[in-house]
Image (cartoon, rainbow, N blue to C red):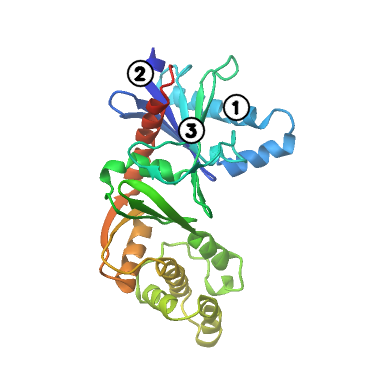
């Protein structure tokens, strides 16, 4: 039976829903499915019709829809195959809220909180929902799974930077996550560009920002002045000097990324940049301006995606669940 030889890895975040059909023995990915069925949108849809069905059942219905499509794409009957799910699916707006695990967290033998939902006639796939991790002042759901799947590629001691809407700086000491910080870099960029008084100075261009002179100027200003003042200068320069809109976007990006990276401790330490290539180019460029003594390693978005099924298989193995 395929349920004996495969698992389904589910990465269910705020904006996206992804399924991977994974062979247990080899950890090879046999089929994938990606949909814009993020937790935020699914929760909003459920709220409109509650209290019937229950929140957990509503999410399992969406999951079942994805499973049916993955089954059709792969040509396999996936009934009974266990699903291991992580990300915002374990939050209060997800399928079922799972408590955060407290750091430190061993990246090779993590102890994460999880809950099993048994299969039934309506929902033939059992689900293992895995929770995130927390410090005294910060929380994470999803990135820790990527980290665990990449454990063999990471330094014993160092800092992993995951750029994005909410960038994460994750400190590793002796193969354990001992601290992390969240920076709202990407979200603030979007708000400033699209909804603030600066929006008319940004234009409609959606091309990726490049590490150019405007970007470098923004990084330098982030290190030497007050970011709130430098933000408004974008508007002033547009009005007074008709500054290029794409240049303004690059400057804004440099200002925010520079502010984020200014929190790093100076000195020789291992940094691992993980994620989209365009973002990694910007962060590498900013690091050259802020401190060139960092030892920088990069992990691609593809490597991070492949790490999720590997981590899910490891978590499932640790639960010793008989399936």
Q: Could you give the CA–CA distance between mark 3 and mark 2, rounded to whole angstroms?
A: 18 Å
Q: Nearer the viewer, mark 1 or mark 3?
A: 3
Q: Secondary structure at mark 2?
A: helix
Report, in whole angstroms, how far the alpha carbon at label 2 lies from the one at label 1: 24 Å
Classify mark 1: helix, strand or loop: helix
Between residue 145 and residue 107, name the one nearer to us. Answer: 107
Which mark sits nearer the N-terminus, 3 or 2?
Answer: 2
Q: Is residue 210 left or right of residue 131?
A: left
- Give residue 74's position: percent from left, percent from top: 40, 24
Q: Which mark is residue 5?
A: 2
- Residue, disc 3: 85
**What crowding class fits label 3: few (fewer than 14 Cα within 10 Å), some (14-19), or many (20 or more)?**
many
Mark in front: 2 vs 1: 2
Q: Report crowding for label 1: few under 14, some 14 to 19, many 20 or more residues within 10 A (C-alpha).
A: some
Tell me if residue 255 can be seen: yes
Residue in the image at 46% along x and 81% along y: 225
**Nearest the eye: 70 or 117:** 117
State the image coordinates of residue 186 (x, y, percent, origin top left).
49, 60
- Asked which secondary structure carries label 3, the reply is strand
Pointers 2 and 1 in contact (CB under 8 A)? no
Q: CA distance from mark 1 to mark 3?
A: 14 Å
Residue at left 60%, top 31%? 59
Q: Nearer the viewer, residue 86 or 58?
A: 86
Badge number at residue 61: 1
Residue at 43%, 46% in the rendered image: 143
């Amino acid at each position: 039976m395929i349920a004996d030889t495969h698992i389904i890895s589910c990465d269910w975040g705020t904006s996206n829903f992804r399924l991977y059909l994974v062979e247990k023995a080899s950890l090879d990915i046999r089929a994938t499915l990606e949909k814009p069925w993020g937790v935020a949108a699914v929760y909003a849809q459920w709220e409109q019709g509650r209290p019937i069905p229950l929140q957990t059942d509503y999410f399992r219905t969406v999951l079942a829809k994805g499973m049916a499509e993955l089954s059709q794409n792969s040509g396999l009957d996936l009934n009974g195959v266990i699903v291991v799910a992580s990300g915002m699916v374990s939050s209060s707006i997800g399928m079922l809220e799972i408590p955060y695990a407290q750091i430190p967290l061993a990246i090779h033998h993590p102890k994460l909180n999880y809950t099993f939902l048994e299969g039934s006639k309506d929902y033939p796939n059992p689900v293992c929902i895995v929770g995130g991790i927390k410090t005294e002042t910060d929380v994470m759901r999803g990135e820790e799974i990527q980290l665990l799947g990449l454990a063999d590629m990471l330094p014993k001691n160092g800092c992993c930077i995951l750029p994005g809407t909410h960038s994460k700086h994750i400190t590793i000491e002796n193969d354990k996550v001992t601290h992390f910080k969240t920076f709202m870099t990407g979200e603030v960029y979007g708000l400033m560009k699209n909804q603030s008084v600066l929006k008319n100075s940004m234009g409609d261009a959606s091309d990726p920002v490049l590490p150019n002179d405007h970007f470098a100027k923004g990084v330098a200003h982030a290190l030497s002045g007050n970011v709130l003042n430098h933000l408004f200068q974008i508007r002033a320069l547009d009005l007074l000097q008709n500054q290029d809109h794409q240049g303004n976007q690059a400057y804004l990006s440099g200002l925010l990324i520079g502010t984020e990276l200014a929190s790093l401790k100076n000195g020789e330490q291992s940094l691992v940049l993980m994620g989209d290539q365009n973002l990694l180019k910007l962060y590498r460029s900013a690091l050259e301006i802020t401190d060139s003594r960092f030892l920088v390693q990069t992990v691609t978005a593809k490597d991070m995606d492949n790490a999720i099924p590997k981590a899910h298989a490891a978590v499932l193995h640790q639960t010793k669940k008989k399936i």
